[in-house]
Amino acid sequence: MRLRLLATALIATAVSACATSTPVCRAPMPDEMSAFRAIISHNPEALAAAMAPGMARNELTAGNTELRAHIWGSNGETRGSVVSLLTQPPLCVMSDPAATDLSAREILVYPQSRYDAVLPADPAATPLPYGVSNRDYLRCRFEQTANGWALADACNFQPRYATITG
């Protein structure tokens, strides 16, 4: 009986510690870094190869200027683009707690300096993400493919155009 109570207490302590722990940064995994390297080097062919089949990859290979501006900026201005955050090493990567799809890996990517700047006084009591999307962090979705994990959404690309139907 004592052993059961002790085990219950230990499990409750471990669960409560997990629920209130501070998020921990990690370095990008190799598949993540492959996509990030293609973005940093401004290599659309390598980026397409590091992406999962779908809308974002189709738009990239079709030369969609809106997607390219999202990734690389436009007219020499990169502020708010994916490359603007990825070119501020070291990167702080963590799982997105808002992720609901278990077949995908959704991550938040911060330059370490931005993460340190927006980290709240009590991170355990404040839900992620901290800061402003595309200024302080990126939200990127990776999906499992036949070749491994691949970037699926060009780091939260949201097309602004609407489909017109007859």
Image: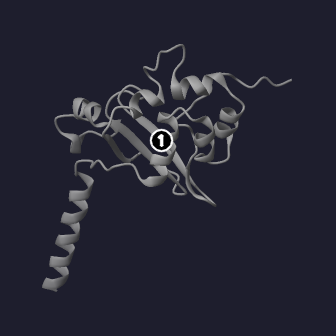
Pointer 1 residue: 37
Q: Residue furthest right?
A: 166
Left or right of 92, for residue 72 = right
- Tally of numbered discs: 1
In the image, 111: left or right of 32? left
How far across and how far down the image is residue 139, in percent?
A: 45, 38
* Picture residue at 19% right of the left edge, 77% below the top: 7
Residue 18, x across and y down, in percent: 25, 57
Q: In this orientation, which residue lies closer to the viewer: 102 or 117?
A: 117
Instruction: Assess disc 1: are there few (<14), some (14-19) or many (≥20) residues with their C-alpha within 10 Å of its C-alpha.
Output: some
Instruction: Give the amino acid type for the residue marked by disc 1 in the picture.
Output: Arg
Q: Position of residue 152 (x, y in %)?
A: 58, 44
The reply to whether residue 21 is visible in this rendering is yes
Secondary element at tag 1: helix
Residue 154 sits above or below residue 33 on the image: above
User: What residue appears at the point 63 percent right and 39 percent down from the top-left corner?
Assistant: 45
Please identify the quadrant where the N terminus is shown.
Answer: bottom left
Q: Quadrant of residue 113?
A: top left
